[in-house]
Image (cartoon, rainbow, N blue to C red):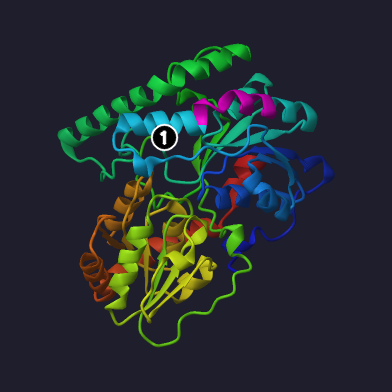
Amino acid sequence: MSDSTAGPRGAGPDSETMRRTYLFALKDAGGTVPPEIGVARRLAARGHNVVVLGDYSMAEQATGVGAMYRPWTDGETGEVRDWALHTPTALARDMFQNMIGGRSPQQARDTASAIDEVRPDLVLTSFFAFGAMVAAESRTVPFDVLLPNTYPMPAKGMPQVGTGFAPATGPLGALRDCISRFGGTKLVDRYALAPLNELRAEYGLSPLATTWDQVHHAKSQLILTSPAFDFPAELPANAHYVGPILDDPAWTTDAQWAPPTGETPLVVVAMSSTFQNHLQCMQRIVDALGGLPVRGLVTTGPAIAPEEIHPPGNVTVLRAVPHYLAMEQANLVITHGGHGTVVKALAAGVPMVILHHGRDQAGNAIRVTSRGAGLKISRRASSRRIAKAVTQVLGNDSYRRAAGELGRAVARDAADQSTLLGCVER
């Protein structure tokens, strides 16, 4: 395992007086779990007292990194059915009802109770744990917000999340971004702002002008990616790029696997770890690889059972493989464009073909393709179109060179944990 996945080396806090207590308030959003738990692991490894308040699905992972675990009392995170929704209004309503609005009051109660019992020096919350932010603010305990993606909120110079836009150029581009930022904020506020302000009033806090102001009240917004991967923008003073966390999900740790035998190029297929209605897409990818002189290694994760995929002879389908090992040997990665998979592929210097599905994935795709490190095609692309994209990337070394150049910066920022630890431990 590389240094970036193995955690910080060297001594922890200099003395007992520097040992601190950290309360993590985390929601399981799939790919966000490994980096968020990775931050907890790094702090526990340095001798700090770490408590994770999280979904039941995170219990084993939390205790496995040396943290104490306590569950939310409202059960599991609701499913975001973005694959079944087709309008921005429906997507916003579903996200804020399932991930934020409906759960914030109980999050606040659970977090306030944990703060009163644990007495943390700092609370670190998931981006969707707005209730936890309210509780920390009401108890006058500083809180940091973990952002395990590119910067997700409106910022001048940053294309609106979810649009897949490249950075704006010229007056029309600036107008495009201004309109999309304004519209995106209004859409979020339509469903989230009133209940959030009601909750803040219940905890003796003043109302907010926009939903995003709750995140801006954090001591730090910790952006868990490389600034070399994200697009430059005017960010708030408390927003800090602290490098990506390349830890693999816990369910890959004990996976038994070997790369497919042969000398042809190895193509690793790594799609979403949460269900995004992507079974047919994966089957078309597998069918495309069946007609090419390659070795395919497909990982389904917990969202799809391996036996649901029908592979040709040159493709191996497994539930789990440690991605950092597979990508060390890969010539190409085919992915949905989740941030974790993308930065791991880049850190290994591997180009990509991205079939983005939703959420932040279109934005990740444009950050790859605009740097020449891969191609993006529709998730509905035919097997023939997928095969053409695979052939194009494997046949042109410029994609690998571009992935290597961007990936060196990503890997360097992943290995350097000084900024992350400096923000959290100060």
Q: What residue lies at 77% left-to-right and 42% top-to-bottom?
A: 18
What kind of secondary structure does the magenta stretch mostly adopt?
helix
Is residue 325 something one can see in this rendering? Answer: yes
Identify the magenta region: 100-111
Q: Position of residue 315 (x, y in %)?
A: 39, 77
Residue at the extreme bottom: 262
The part of the image, by quadrant, that contains residue 184 is top left
Quadrant housing the C terminus: top right
Q: Position of residue 221 (x, y in %)?
A: 52, 36
Please give the residue where the numbered disc 1 appears in the rendered image: 235
- In terms of depth relative to the viewer, which is nearer, 155 or 274? 274
Q: Is residue 397 magenta?
A: no
Q: Position of residue 9 (x, y in %)?
A: 68, 61
Q: What residue lies at 29% left-to-right and 41% top-to-bottom?
A: 163
Q: Is residue 108 magenta?
A: yes
Q: Position of residue 116 (x, y in %)?
A: 77, 26
Image position of 280 with respect to 91: above or below: below
Q: Secondary structure at mark 1?
A: loop
Residue at the extreme right: 16
Image position of 310 with respect to 35: above or below: below
Quadrant housing the N terminus: bottom right
Q: Please name the amino acid that badge 1 sits on.
A: Leu
